[in-house]
Image: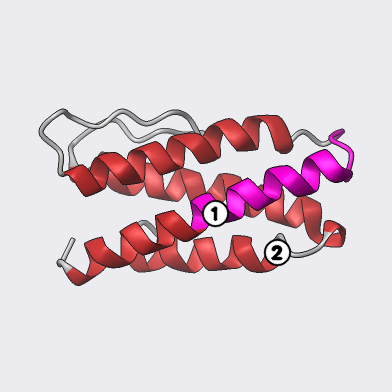
Amino acid sequence: MGTIKDCRRQVDQVKKASVSTEAAYLARTRLKRTVLSCSRMISRRYGLPQPELPTLLSVPPDSSRRVHRIANCCNRLVESAGVLCQPSEPLDVRWKTGWDGIRKDLEELDSLLASEESDGF
């Protein structure tokens, strides 16, 4: 794992799993896995230490604008996952609203990854 194609496939799996509260735990797990894969991919590209767990990602200042946007998107997802991915989090309005924001970030991440892929990342 670790290519843009892998990350995009994982983004798609998270989106599919997050459509219903019945699949909440699956969606939560996939979200964390997706963020970790994307963070590792960016870390490898810049020779940074690869995270072992989903964590905030910092990229070098001379990275492309798009890579900064990918990192920012991953960071928002890490923060959202930290709140929503608690096993005891109730599947209520707060959870559903939170997943609406996550889905928007996933759409943005997928779009940014697609652009990187077409540019030969």
Image height of 38 relative to 53, above or below: below
Label disc, if present, on residue 40 of the rendered structure: none
Residue drawn where x is 25% and y is 67% of the image:
117
Q: Is residue 17 left or right of residue 88?
A: left
Question: Which residue type carries mark 2?
Answer: Ala
Image height of 52 relative to 24, above or below: above
- Please give the residue where the numbered disc 2 appears in the rendered image: 17
- Residue 114 at x, y = what percent? 32, 67
Of the residues under marks 1 and 2, which one precedes in the sequence?
2
Q: Secondary structure at mark 2?
A: helix
Quadrant assignment for the C terminus: bottom left
Q: Nearer the viewer, residue 61 or 6?
A: 61
Question: Which residue type carries mark 1?
Answer: Lys
- Residue 95 at x, y = what percent? 79, 43
Q: Nearer the viewer, residue 91 or 44?
A: 91
- Please give the residue where the numbered disc 1 appears in the rendered image: 104
Label 2 Cα neighbours within 10 Å, binned few <14 / some 14-19 / many ≥20:
many
Quadrant assignment for the N terminus: bottom left
Label 1 Cα neighbours within 10 Å, binned few <14 / some 14-19 / many ≥20:
few
Residue drawn where x is 89% and y is 44% of the image:
92
Q: Is residue 108 left or right of residue 50?
A: right
Q: Which residue is most to the left?
A: 62
Image height of 111 relative to 85, above or below: below
- Residue 32 at x, y = what percent? 58, 44
Residue drawn where x is 71% and y is 60% of the image:
18
What stretch of residues is rendered in magenta?
Answer: 88-106
Residue drawn where x is 51% and y is 61% of the image:
11
